[in-house]
Each structure stands twice: as C-alpha cells, then as structure tokens.
C-alpha cells in the first residue's frame, strides 16, 4: 500500500462522513486560527514599536533616572531624578569625547489654545541640539536658539498634529500667538511630519526652550536649587563608539551625581537596541503564552480525533477483517488509519490557518494602528504541529485496528 | 478418519491455467486446535488429516460444533493450528507469523463469504482490485476487469454494492477471490444469504470455474443439497473427519429442483 493510495482511501472515508470530519477538525481549526491571528497581530505590534524606536534618531543613547533594578516602592526613583548638572556633565566634550551632542527633555501634558481652538498635548522643553539628535527639523520658520534657552524666551515650535488642531484653517503658524496653560507664546516654527503612527504620535508635541519649561511653565526647581530634567538624549559619533560612550557617560554622571566608588548607579543608560530587546522579550513571553494556548487546543483537538478514529475503527471492523483476509498486513492497516488521522488533523490545521490569516487580514484592514503580519515560521509550525497531533493521537486507534484478529473482525456484527 | 492418499478422486483432464491437476494443493496431517476458555479446554479439531488435489471441488460439512468453522479458519490460514501440519501448495503454513499468513492468504487463497463482505460505497472494480493492492501488483484495473468478466459482470464494473442485487454482489466477491489467481477458493456458505435463483446462479459460476479453469474450490456448508453440487464431501463431527466420499453424480446447478428439507434430512 503506498502513500497515494492511502491518501485517496483516507479522503474517501472522510468525504463519506463530511459533517463528522468537520466537527472533529473543529478543535484544531479553532486552535490554529486563534493562534495564527494572535501571533500575526503580535508581529504587527512589534513592527510598529521597532519602527518607532528606530525613528527616534541615529545612534541614540537614553539616560533615564533610576538604577536598572530600582525598586519604585522604596522611593529610589524620586531621589534618582536627573538634573541640569547631569546634562551639562554629559555635554562636556573633554569628559565624554565620544558623544556628538546631547539634548535633555523636560515635558508635561498641557492645554494649548489659540482663539477658540484647543489641543491637549505634551509640551517639552529642550535645547537646540534636539533637532540634530532626533533627526527632526522645522519645515517652516526656525527652531529656538541657545539664547532663547538662556533667556527663557516664550517661543514655541509646533508639531504637525498640534498645528492641525490649532490652525484648522491652514493659516501659516509662524508669528502667531498661542497660549500654553494660559501663558502667551509666539510660534516661531513648524516641525516636519515625523509620522510614527500607532500608539505614540510623534507629531503630537510642542517644543519650547528648556529654561522656559523649567522656570515659567512647569516649575522644576528642587529644594537644593537644582532643576529637574526627565531624560537626556545623547548622540554617539558612530555605532562602533557606542560602548566607549556608555562607559564615559557613566563615569561623568557618577562624578556629577557624587556617587561613591562602591555605590550603585542611580541612573540607566539605554541604547535603542536595549529598548527594542526589552520589548521583544515581552513579545516572546506573549508568544510563549499563545503557544501554550495553542498546545492546549491542539491537545483537545487531538483527543477529539482519537475519539472519532476509535469510533471509525469499531465501525469498520468488518472492513478491517476483510482487508486482512485478502492479504493486508498489520502495517497496511496501521498506515491506512494513521494516514486518515494525519490528514484529518492537517486539514484542520490548514483550514485554521486560512481562517487565522483571514482574521489577521481583517484586523489590519480595519485598524490604522498596525499591519498584522502572517509569520511564515508560525504557519509552518501550525501545519507541522497539526500533523504531529494527528500522528500522535492516531497511533492508538490505528494500532488497535492493526491488531484486530481477522476471524473475529470478519464475524463482528 | 481417512487419509485419502491412495484413493484419489478422478479429476477432469482440463488443465488450462491452474497448474497440473492431481498435484496436492492441501496436505493436512494430524491437525488439532485447542481453545482455552478459562478453566476449560475445547478441542475443536482433534487430529484431522486431509489431502486435497488441484482441480478438486470439495464440500466440508458437519453440524454446528463439529469443528467446521475452525477447519475453515485453518484452511484459510486465518488461524494457526495447536499441533499438526498444513502444507498449502507445498508451503508449510502451520507455524507462520501473522504477516506471513497475510501474505499466504493474499497469494494462495480466495475467500467468498456468506455475507459477501464488500466494502460499502466502493465500485465493483475497486473491490476486485483489493487483493492486488496488497500484492503490490501492476495493471490492477485490467486484471480486475477480466475477473469481473469471468463472473459475468463485465457490464457493471462501476456499480456500487447498493446498486447490485445479492447475487451480483456475491459474484463481485467471487471475482475478488479469483483475481490474484489463488491456489484455492474457500467459500463459506456462499449461497446462504441468497434466494434460490441467485444461489443457483452462483453455484453455476463455481461449477463452471472448476470445470473450465480447473480451479480448486472448497465449500464449507451445512446444506446437503448444496454439498451435492460438489464432487467430494468431507464430513466433520466432534473435531474429526467421520466421512470422506466422492459424489457419484454431482448435481448440475439449475438442472434439479431443491427437494423439501424433510427429504434432505431423511436422505
């Protein structure tokens, strides 16, 4: 008995009981469809996140407060705030030669109005180097200057989203006056469109000089006279110098923050790949979890297949007896039923795959957030797994069929 | 218990196909079969010796419990004897593995059953191809078609069992038994589920196959009238051969009417 004949036989037998075959496959269909949809969505989410972080700029390092294993509940974070001193320490080229430029940010949510229009957005204070660090430039007007920072000038540069909300009529914004938390600001520039669809619209921002933010809008002065910043963005000269830059930055920050030789750092330096790596760790946990669900549903589906195959063996006892009488050997019968179980399971896997791909397509179709992407390795895995389930759960019924005594089988009523 | 080694049944001279007539195809010596049922031992066969020559047409008779069914299982290589020897077409099959027996059944034996045992929903030609599939033979379709023509079903090769009468279904089964050119055809009450007209047709086919092709045929039956269509009757009782005799003038299927059951019993 060869494979083609067994396959034809199995298909014939499944076609003879279409409804039963479909119901049996349902467990596997649902399991595979759910997993394929969810994994596709997961891949889509990861794509969005990765592209957003890559869109932040080139060879970026982030300095954020808190040691990598800080405990928020003991207040480490509060004490670990970054300040202007830290920024100035990093901006010192003799201490940190491998950094090209540095830009601190200090932002808070705020209400921005112009006439009757209103926008709720994030107002971020920074320095002129921000444009080069983020690779993010004005298309109209200018960015603010060092002098604007020093004098805490009330000037603002608008992101595209904010501009569209405040200037629905399309008036050129440069020279216009807006109010941020009821303080008048003169618009001096409009940023280019950064895109960044998804959860974090990078164009939904108003940029103002750092000192203006710290002193006029969102008081950042601490009891010790230092001014807080949220994070510090630093651009490395080249990718090869990144590791050296991290060491130099750590040394400079330890000094500026007065951290003793043996004490732990209370800040964290992250590279873009660190952030992406941390995110993919989350995605991996998610994938593992989905795999577990898939495993359970395939298990349930497999038990269904075993059940139906046992029924089928009993129903076809006479047929098995006859086949043995005319010369079928044990392995002929074994493979006949095993093929049927494997085809049943694989067919379920394929149908589930098609439904899952359809689900992923529907989600990308009706959501602007992400493009659900069918991962080919999960497709291959789904098919292989379904076939393996068919094989595993088909073995017992097929062995039972193969072991039937032809005399008893022929007499079976 | 007679071993008919020196008193051979005359066979017809027609020798067109199935090897030399007169050569023994079945040699059974002191065969026993003991079934254990818990505490009890049942001796279904208690020392049977039989020779059957190529081209013979033999009926094996006996009341229920005589060992007839056990004998059928042994002859059909479906089961192994507890002791004794069984040479089928010169091959000792008394101590073979299950898979070896399957191979012997495939090549040497054609089965015809009382209830036909056709596969549901499968066209006649594929039913007949079945033994060839397990024999891994080529030109299956052509050979199956020829076998169906031999039993007069050349026009119905694509009919399914549900589209055939009982007699036609049994003829498909006979074609299936023939198709791999076995040494013997073993038929278990082949007319038991048929009306008398279909039964007569089937008997006529067996007689023709035996007469024209020299095919060795064994009938297992409890019906004396059916048995008289063969040329030799072996009677079993209590696991031994109690009678083994030639039928002087075998009935020709369709040329005599079945007598009443009473008449048969008082024969």
Image (tube, grey):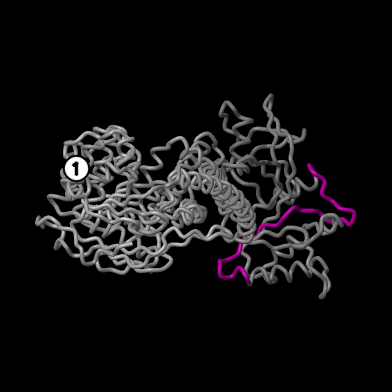
B34 relative to A294, above or below? below
Residue labelled with disc 1 = B251
Whether B99 is among the magenta residues is no
Query: Residue sitting at 28 percent across and 45 percent down?
Result: B127
Dot 1 falls on a residue whose secondary structure is loop
Query: Residue sitting at 50 percent across and 54 percent down?
Result: A385
User: Would you say A75 lies left or right of A136 here?
Assistant: right
Farthest bottom residue in view: A261
Q: Where's the N terminus of chain B, which quadrant? A: bottom left
Segment colored magenta: A216-243
- Which sits in the foreground, B196 or A219? B196
- Which sits in the foreground, A313 or A374? A313
B234 relative to A168, above or below? below
User: Would you say A173 lies left or right of B193 here?
Assistant: right
Can you give x and y, in whole percent of width and height, for residue B229 in the image? 22, 45
One can see residue A44 in this view: no
Can you give x and y, in whole percent of width and height, for residue B38 in the image? 58, 59
């Amino acid at each position: 008995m060869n494979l083609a004949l067994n396959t034809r036989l199995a298909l014939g037998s499944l076609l003879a009981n279409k409804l039963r075959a479909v119901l049996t496959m349902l467990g596997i269909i649902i399991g595979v469809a759910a997993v394929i949809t969810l994994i596709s969505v997961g891949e889509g989410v990861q794509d969005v996140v990765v592209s957003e972080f890559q869109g932040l700029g080139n060879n970026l390092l982030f300095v954020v407060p808190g040691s990598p294993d800080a405990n928020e509940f003991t207040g480490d974070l509060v004490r670990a705030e970054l300040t202007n001193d830290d920024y100035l320490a990093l901006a010192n080229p003799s201490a940190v030669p491998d950094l090209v430029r540095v830009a601190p940010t200090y932002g808070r949510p705020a209400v921005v109005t112009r006439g009757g229009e209103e926008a709720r957005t994030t107002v971020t204070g920074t320095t002129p180097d921000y444009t080069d660090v983020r690779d993010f430039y004005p298309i109209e007007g200018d960015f603010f200057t060092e002098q604007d920072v020093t004098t805490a000038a009330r000037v603002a540069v608008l992101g595209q989203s904010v501009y569209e909300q405040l200037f629905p009529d399309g008036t050129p914004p440069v020279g216009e006056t807006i109010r941020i938390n009821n303080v008048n600001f003169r618009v001096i520039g409009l940023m280019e469109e950064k895109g960044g669809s998804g959860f974090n619209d990078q164009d939904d921002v108003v940029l103002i000089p750092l000192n203006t933010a710290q002193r006029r809008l969102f008081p950042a002065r601490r009891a010790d006279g230092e001014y807080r910043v949220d994070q510090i963005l630093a651009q490395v000269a080249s990718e090869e110098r990144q590791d050296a830059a991290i060491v130099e930055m750590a040394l400079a920050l330890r000094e500026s923050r007065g951290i003793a030789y043996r004490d732990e750092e209370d800040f964290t330096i992250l590279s873009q790949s660190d952030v992406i790596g941390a995110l993919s760790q989350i995605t991996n946990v998610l994938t593992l979890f989905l795999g577990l669900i898939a495993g359970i549903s395939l298990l349930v589906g497999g038990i269904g297949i075993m059940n139906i195959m046992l029924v089928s063996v009993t129903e076809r006892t006479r047929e098995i007896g006859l086949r043995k009488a005319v010369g079928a050997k044990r392995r002929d019968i074994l493979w006949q039923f095993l093929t049927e179980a494997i085809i049943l399971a694989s067919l379920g896997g394929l149908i589930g795959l098609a439904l899952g791909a359809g689900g992923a397509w529907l989600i990308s179709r009706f959501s602007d957030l992400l493009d659900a992407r069918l991962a080919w390795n999960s497709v291959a895995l789904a098919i292989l797994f379904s076939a393996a389930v068919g094989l595993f759960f088909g073995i017992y019924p097929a062995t039972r069929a193969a072991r039937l005594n032809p005399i008893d089988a022929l007499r079976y009523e | 218990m007679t071993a008919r080694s020196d008193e051979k049944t005359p066979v017809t001279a027609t020798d067109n196909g199935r090897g030399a007539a007169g050569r023994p195809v079945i040699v059974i010596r002191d065969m026993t079969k003991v079934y254990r049922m818990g505490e009890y031992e049942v001796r279904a066969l208690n020392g049977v010796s039989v020779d059957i020559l190529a081209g013979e047409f033999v009926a094996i008779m006996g009341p229920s419990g005589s060992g007839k069914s056990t004998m059928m299982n042994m002859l059909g290589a479906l089961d192994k004897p507890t002791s004794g020897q069984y040479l089928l077409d010169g091959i000792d099959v008394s101590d073979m593995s299950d898979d070896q027996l399957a191979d012997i059944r495939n090549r040497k034996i054609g089965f015809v059953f009382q209830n036909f045992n056709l596969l549901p929903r499968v066209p006649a030609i594929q039913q007949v191809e079945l033994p060839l599939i397990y024999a891994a033979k080529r030109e299956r379709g052509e050979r199956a078609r020829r076998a169906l023509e031999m039993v007069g079903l050349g026009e119905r090769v694509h009919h399914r069992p549900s589209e055939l009468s009982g007699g036609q279904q049994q003829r498909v089964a006979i074609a299936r038994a023939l198709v791999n050119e076995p040494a013997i055809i073993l038929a278990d009450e082949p007319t038991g589920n048929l009306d008398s007209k279909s039964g007569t047709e089937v008997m006529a086919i067996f007689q023709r196959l035996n007469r024209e092709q020299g095919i060795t045929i064994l009938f297992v039956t409890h019906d004396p009238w059916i048995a008289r269509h063969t040329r030799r009757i072996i009677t079993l009782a209590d696991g031994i051969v109690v009678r083994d005799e030639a039928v002087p003038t075998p009935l020709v299927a369709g040329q005599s009417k079945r007598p009443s059951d009473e008449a048969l019993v008082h024969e």
